[in-house]
Amino acid sequence: MLILTNPNSISVKVLCAEIVRWLREKKIYVEPRVRTELLTESSYYSFVQTWKDGNGTVLWTCT
């Protein structure tokens, strides 16, 4: 699972944190930036994984 967020939306950030709590038993991958933000809030999110840079994959999202 890949969770993408809008970095300028507090409500999306809160919702993302709730989703991550619910999915804690799953293997969860988030953007490296999101993982950093989550770990800044709490070490509770240490189970969240991220992908390594440099594999040539670029993901674009738009609203």
Image (spheres, rainbow, N blue to C red):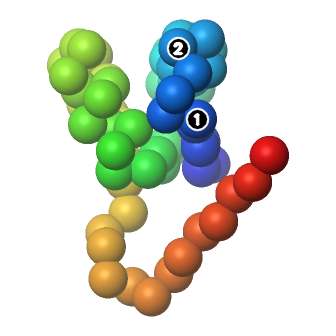
Q: Residue at x 80, y 46 (%)?
A: 63
Q: Which mark is residue 10?
A: 2
Q: Amino acid at mark 1?
A: Asn
Number of numbered callouts drawn: 2
| 24 shown above or below 29 | above
User: Can you tell which quarter of the image residue 62 is in?
Assistant: bottom right
Looking at the image, the residue that sits furthest to the right is: 63
Q: Which percent across, then down, holds residue 20?
A: 52, 24
| 57 shown above or below 46 | below
Q: Amino acid at mark 2?
A: Ile
For label 1, the residue is 6
Which element carries disc 2, helix, strand or loop? helix
Real-space CA distance between mark 2 and mark 1, rounded to the nearest whole angstrom: 9 Å
Q: Residue at x 58, y 35 (%)?
A: 6
> Taking the image as drawn, is residue 22 in sight?
no
As rendered, which of 29 and 6 lies closer to the eye?
Answer: 6
Q: Residue at x 32, y 82 (%)?
A: 54
Looking at the image, the residue that sits furthest to the front is: 8
Q: Which percent across, then down, holds residue 36?
A: 26, 37
Which element carries disc 1, helix, strand or loop? loop
Taking the image as shown, residue 49 lies to the left or right of residue 22, namely: left
Taking the image as shown, residue 47 lies to the left or right of residue 14, namely: left
Q: Which percent across, then down, holds residue 45?
A: 31, 24
